[in-house]
Image (cartoon, rainbow, N blue to C red):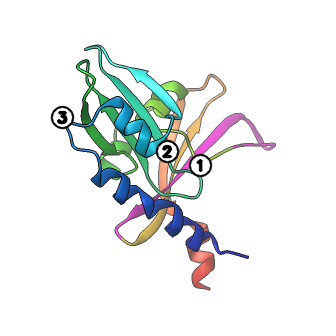
Amino acid sequence: MVSWLTSLLAFVGCDPQKIAKLEEGVATEADVKKQFGEPQATYSEADGAKTFEYSRQPEGQVAWMITIGADGKMSALRQVLKPTEFTKVKPGMDKAEVRRLLGKPGKTAKFDLKPDEEHWDWRWLDGQMAKVFSVTFDRDGKVMASAVSDDPRATESRN
């Protein structure tokens, strides 16, 4: 059986090679799709641009948001699973806003003892430390709380 770490390294290892083939202001939408495939979601921007979501969840620890400007050229490529983005998650935001900010979560869960809550988790790296960013939504799909913790899968593999 292949370990989750081996799978992760094989999967994420391709992203730097794909990114190296995309130059901001030069690469087109077709170039982005050639490297990354069809996006998991597409978001329309106010200025006519569109942003493609490429989440590497649940096994990966990154989520890419790639913006194609109104001129058809790539204008930004961002890895969004990082503390500066997590601080933008605020109480009262809805699920769609959080998804737009961080990409598809790696795990969603509801618990019998807390039926009015839903939990979303994203795996990410803080330097070399594997972490999980969690968001708790209320029954209306609004953010109640968020937290960062150690990734239990990484902790288990060290034991």
Pointer 1 residue: 106
Q: Main secondary structure of the magenta part?
A: strand
Q: Dots 3 and 1: beta carbons under 8 Å?
A: no
- Residue beneath the point at 53% across and 34% down: 40
- Residue beneath the point at 42% across and 63% down: 125
Count residues near mark 3 (Cα–Cα under 10 Å), then give few for <14, some for 14-19, many for 20+.
Answer: some
Pointer 3 residue: 25
Q: Is residue 89 visible to us here?
A: no
Q: How many marks?
A: 3
In-front residue for pair 38/90: 38
Query: Can you say whether 25 is above or below 154 in the image?
Result: above
Q: Position of residue 45 (x, y in %)?
A: 33, 18
Q: Position of residue 23 (x, y in %)?
A: 22, 44
- Point out the tag, 1 or 2, that comes first from the N-terminus: 2
Where on the picture, by quarter, is residue 64?
top left
Query: Can you say whether 94 is above or below 156 in the image?
Result: above
Q: Mark 2: which amino acid?
A: Ser
Q: Is residue 20 visible to us here?
A: yes
Pointer 2 residue: 55
Q: Mark 3: which amino acid?
A: Gly
Q: Secondary structure at mark 1?
A: loop
